[in-house]
Structure formats: C-alpha cells, structure tokens
Amino acid sequence: MTSLRDALNAVLKASDKVIDFEQAAATVGQSPPAREVECTICNGAGFVVNGAYDPNTMHYSETTVRCPDPDCPVVKRNLKARYDTLIAKAPLPAEYANFDFQDWYRLSERQPDMCRGKWLGIGAAMVFAHSSEVGHWFRLQEAYAMVDVDQPAPNEFSKNSLLLAGKPGVGKTSLAACIVNDLRTKEIPALYERVSNILDALKEPFNHGNDREYDYGETEQKILNTFKYAPVLVMDEFNLARASDYSRQRLEDIVRHRYAHQLPTVMTTNLTSFDEFNEHWGDRVGHAVEGMAHWIVMSGAELRRRGGPVESI
C-alpha cells in the first residue's frame, strides 16, 4: 500500500519538488537563519526614526531621516534609482546631447587655434570624468599632463569639483555636457541643470499659477534635497544678472552642503574671478566654491555663433 508520504511526493515530483520529511522534522522549533543586514545602522531600511520627548508638553514625536551612514548600500541604491528616473526625464539640452571628448579631439586636429585658451579646461574635464573610481578627486597637475601643457600648475591640492569660467561661447557648457555623457555611459548618475531652472523649481511650490511642471519634488525641501544629494551635480550658467537674497540662500544651501559632504560638483559661470563671484553670490557661497572646486578660466575663440546654434566641434 502506498503511504501518504509517497503519494504526496509522487505528486510533487511532477513539479520537481520533493519534501525531505526527516530534515523538516529536525528543524521544527528552531529559529530561522539570521537575515544578512546590508547596513547595521538602519537595519537595511535606508532610514532611521528619531524620537524626542518634550517634558513641557508631555508630547513624544518622531522624525524619519535618511540613514546617516555615508556608505549605506541601501541609500546608495535608492539614490541611484531616483536619479536614473530624473535623468531620463531631464536630459541635456538638445544642442549638447551628443557632445563627447572625441569631438574636442577632432576639433584640436582640425582647427588647433580654436582650442587655444581652452586646453586646461579640456584636460580638467577629462580628468574629472575619468577619475570617477576615486570620487573625482584630482590635482591640476593631472589636467596639465592630460593635454601635455608644459607649465607649472598653480594648485597642488586635490579637489573633487570643477568650475569652468569664461565669456559666453568658449565651450564651458559643451565640456560640462561631455562630462555628463561620459559618466552616464558608465552608469554614474550625473544630474545636469541650469541654475536658473533650479531656482525656478524651488519657487514652484509657492507659485501655483505657473503650469510648468518639475520632477524634482513636491515641496521646496524635497527639491532642495534633490540637488544637495545628487551623486554628481552639474550646475550650468552660475551667472544670473541679479541674484535675490532668496536665490543666494538656496544656492548657498546646495553648495555648502555639497562642499561639507565632499559631493562632486561641476559648475560653469561667466564670472571670471573669485572676487567677482563673491560679489555676485556672497562670500559664503564663494568660499565654499573656492574650497571645493578647481577654478579654470577658459578663453580664446568662441565656438558659438552669436544669435545662432552651437558650432559643431
């Protein structure tokens, strides 16, 4: 006579499943194996809950904050997914969408005079992109060596951010676009946005009559955090004609947070000196930018026709 056990296993065998009854019986009453936790600080949740008791009101409140561990794999994974979505919805401007460093190499071969005054900027942009494995930290000597400039570098310190300065049309944004495209091909989320659009997005929650939609968050703080925490942030056209106190404060929040947390940042500006930059944006923003970024002034021939599109390089 076929036992119930044999009959059950005969049925399960058809679906490639057979129960080891002896092993199952041996594990009855035992605790399940310990789950491997990716982060011991947040217990793999990606966030922690902080509680506070106010003895005056006898009220207990809780706030949920991002895991404070900068190496938390859960936070890193969630951030990458978030910025991958943003990047898909906020691509580079169409005129810069296909720029890469090979375009600059071809330009240097075809019209070397067009690159005069731009070599250090080209080298710094290439080193920044290529040093992604070490957090984009590099010295200016490496930028000089990249483009064979036989000239002593003015700064011995390693920094992981870059500011490209110069008059309009000299190639600042096209180099920033090369960096963005190079990093995105390596699946490194690099978020690009013009400074004016960042400030417009921050004002959007208070301006319900504006029908322009942003994907950076529903509140001012969420929008601000999008740019504060971006793995790599490219802020183009850091040169508004008149910066209000609100604009200065919001940009200060972003820049000083990224400086304090050593988050790689690329900036472009028409303001060609730190004094001019400080006067425009304030000493606190200027001090942070000076401390975090290699300042490269680009010059030479314009690559963009006035009133027209960017010249093909």
Image (cartoon, rainbow, N blue to C red):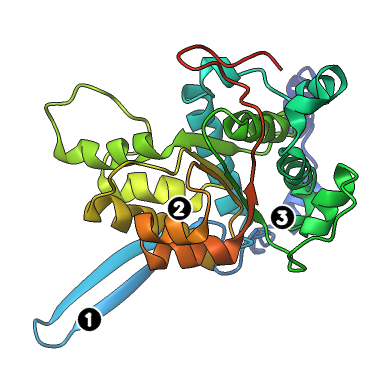
Q: Are marks 1 and 3 in contact (CB under 8 Å)?
A: no
SS at badge 1: strand
- How far across and down, in percent of the image, does residue 296 sit? 65, 50
Q: Quadrant location of residue 293?
A: bottom right
- Of residues 294 and 228, the one nearer the viewer is 294
Q: Which disc number belongs to residue 228?
A: 2
Q: Residue furthest left?
A: 57
Tell me which residue sits at (36%, 34%) in the image. Answer: 197
Tell me which residue sits at (29%, 50%) in the image. Answer: 247
Quadrant holding the C terminus: top right
In the rendered image, which residue does mark 3 sit on? 135
- Of residues 187 and 99, the one nearer the viewer is 99
**Earlier sequence position, callout 1 versus callout 3:** 1
Q: Quadrant location of residue 110?
A: top right
The answer to whether 289 is drawn above or below residue 166 in the figure is below
Characterize the local packing of mark 3: few (<14), some (14-19) or many (20 or more) Cα atoms within 10 angstroms.
some
**Earlier sequence position, callout 1 versus callout 2:** 1
Tell me which residue sits at (40%, 51%) in the image. Answer: 225
How far apart are the two marked residues, 1 and 2, measured between alpha carbons? 30 Å
Q: Is residue 118 visible?
A: yes
SS at badge 2: helix
What type is the residue that disc 2 sits on? Lys
Quadrant holding the N terminus: top right
- How far across and down, in percent of the image, does residue 133 sit? 79, 50
Q: Which disc number belongs to residue 53?
A: 1
What type is the residue that disc 3 sits on? Gly
Horizontal side, residue 289 vs residue 218: left or right: right
Of circles 1 and 2, the one toward us is 2
What type is the residue that disc 1 sits on? Tyr
The answer to whether 190 is drawn above or below residue 112 in the figure is below
Horizontal side, residue 91 vs residue 144: left or right: left
